[in-house]
Image: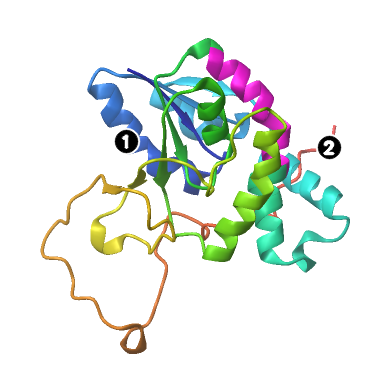
Amino acid sequence: MRILFFSNPLPERLTPLLPLARALRENGHEVALATASEAAPWLEQEGFELMFFGPTTYEVTAEVARRIGVDILLSPATDIMAEYFAGARVDLMADEAVDRAGRWMPDLIVSEHCDLVGPLVASACEVPCVVAVTGTALEPDEVDALTATVRTRYLDRGLQPPPQAPDGRPLLHLSPPSLRPQWPAADRRHDATRAEPGPAPARLSLARRRRATLSTGRRAGHIPCAAPRPPKN
């Protein structure tokens, strides 16, 4: 099977995908990763087939700021998140992604849950898509904003918009069930790639416990507004 991964070019998005990609390769599948070239330092040593194209983090951030017309740090976080992941980034790379994926001819697309390009490509290429949950779950209002923003990107390309974004069946959780975030997509099948290493910890009521996020990077909807600027010539 030919499996194409899509991800934002951020270590906290890519790193959780790598064990899955390695396991698929070890089981005889052909695996390729599609993301922007800024991810090269983290990926080239892995030996996967790489498709480097699309905007860098800084380029998407700059485009979001241009569209909003104000400092993105002063805009509502949900609006920024939706414009970044479901608006500007999709606009800047979706058509090339469809073309590149069409020529590679994947049998399956795996997309990390803040990547909205992969599911659109899967729809255009008529192949199944699995969404890998690589961090904390999106809030219901963030899911609604992503769904509304990406809708026109599907319609403009003659595709059926998903009822909920990110779109994918099933949701593939890369952490044990006890660490699984409470994802708002109750109608989807939830699969975990890792079993509990031991007895699952007892769940306490929210009133009795403190909450903390342990992850490889930023929270799910965080926009990397402070991305480094490219060096001046």
Percent position of residue 16, x then y: 39, 44
Left or right? Give the position of 32 relative to 147.
Answer: left
Percent position of residue 194, x then y: 22, 48
Which label sits on residue 74? none
| Dot placed on the residue nearer the N-terminal end, 2 or 1 | 1
Which residue reaches farthest right? 69
- Residue at horizontal 50 percent and vertical 28 percent from the top: 122
Task: Tell me the crowding category of disc 1: few under 14, some 14 to 19, or many 20 or more residues within 10 angstroms, Cα based.
Answer: some
Q: Is residue 155 visible?
A: yes
Report which residue position mark 2 lands on: 232
Q: Main secondary structure of the magenta part?
A: helix
Which label sits on residue 20? 1
Q: Amino acid at mark 2?
A: Lys
In front of the other: 211 or 100: 100
- Residue at horizontal 58 percent and vertical 64 percent from the top: 141
Magenta span of residues? 88-102
